[in-house]
Amino acid sequence: MPEQTDDRISIIMGDITIQHVDAIANAANPTLLGGGGVDGAIHRAAGPGLLEECRTLGGCRTGEAKITKGYNLPARFVIHTVGPVWRKGGKDEDVLLAACYRNSLTLAELSGVKTIAFPAISTGAYGFPYERAANIAVWTVREFISTHPSMERVVFVCHGEKAYRIYCETFEKDWADHPETLLAEAIAAHLLMIETSHNIRIRNREEIVRRIAPAVKNSIQALSFGISLNTWVAVSRMTGDMTVPDKVLLQIVEQMNKT
Ligand code: AR6
């Protein structure tokens, strides 16, 4: 089996159901009651106990994740996440796909998982363009593990040679020199996390992404923007629908450029 590795990320070609890792991620649907593709393969390999436990979970929203035991799988846990259905990019698909990876990793970490394998979420029945999805997957995972040392290894399991090649090419892109679109995705993902964790909706989210992305040079700055905005939201105690004032954005960008 071909394999490409750095010290914490592996890209392999194969079947996720046979991976010896602490957890495998499942590209599920909102019912969590099984389906085709990788979901079907995982349920078949895990056995009926998995479906039984899934029935107790009350489904899962797009971009979110839920955890179960792995039953007959070599992996101890399955992290079920629901990817977005591709709708030509106009329905926050990038942000939601990034949220799948981030929420799965967060949930995994909370359960003591140190090694996790991911399939290419949303790239089958849900129709997400493969290359774009691979970029988001690699980008989001790299960013997450850079700030979460307890996650020792993440394995991308590619189903087929073409898929494997695309992941390898994405992986080799210079991490410090990502194109603006990827930085925009990272910023959008930070905004989504802020919205979720403070239970707010940022009305000018898209405008913020458009304005901030060109000012951000790398992932560290994108993260630093996310942290500063998160702090501002926490201190301002805003709730419900809110707009981030221009003044605040300018202050954060100014601060970011000093670091
Ligand atoms: N190991 C690794 N990857 C696999 C495997 C496998 N055994 N089998 C398929 N893939 P999909 P989605 C790859 O359709 O697009 C289900 O019915 C596959 O080549 O499984 O998120 C759910 O219940 C593709 O690249 O998931 C939902 O209804 C990737 O896994 C819906 O499909 C994801 O393809 C979810 O659609």
Image (cartoon, rainbow, N blue to C red):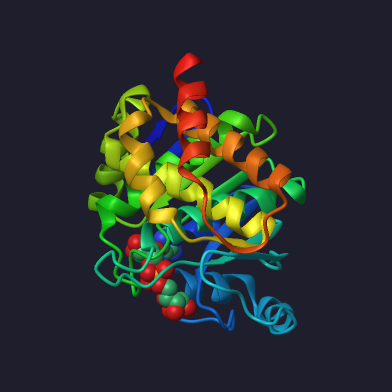
Give the image location of residue 51, x and y in percent: 66, 81
Task: Decide which of 33, 190 is in the foreground and name it.
Answer: 190
Give the residue at x 69% y 46%: 236
Image-quadrant location for residue 67: bottom right
Give the image location of residue 48, x and y in percent: 67, 82
Give the residue at x 34% y 34%: 171
Q: Above or below — where is 183 with respect to 173?
A: below
- In the figure, is residue 228 to the left or right of 95? right
Task: Decide which of 30, 220 is in the foreground and name it.
Answer: 220
Task: Decide which of 39, 145 is in the foreground and name it.
Answer: 145
- In the figure, is residue 127 to the left or right of 93? left
Q: Above or below — where is 103 with respect to 39?
A: above
Q: Above or below — where is 168 with respect to 51?
A: above
Tag count in the figure? 0
Give the residue at x 29% y 30%: 173
Ligand 1 position by quadrant? bottom left
Task: Decide which of 42, 253 is in the foreground and name it.
Answer: 253
Give the image location of residue 239, x and y in percent: 68, 61
Evaluate whether residue 37 shows in this view.
Answer: no
Q: Above or below — where is 51 with respect to 144?
A: below
- In the figure, is residue 96 to the left or right of 49? left
- In the figure, is residue 31 to the left or right of 186? right
Give the image location of residue 181, x and y in percent: 29, 42
Evaluate whether residue 168 shows in this view.
Answer: yes
The N terminus - image quarter: top left
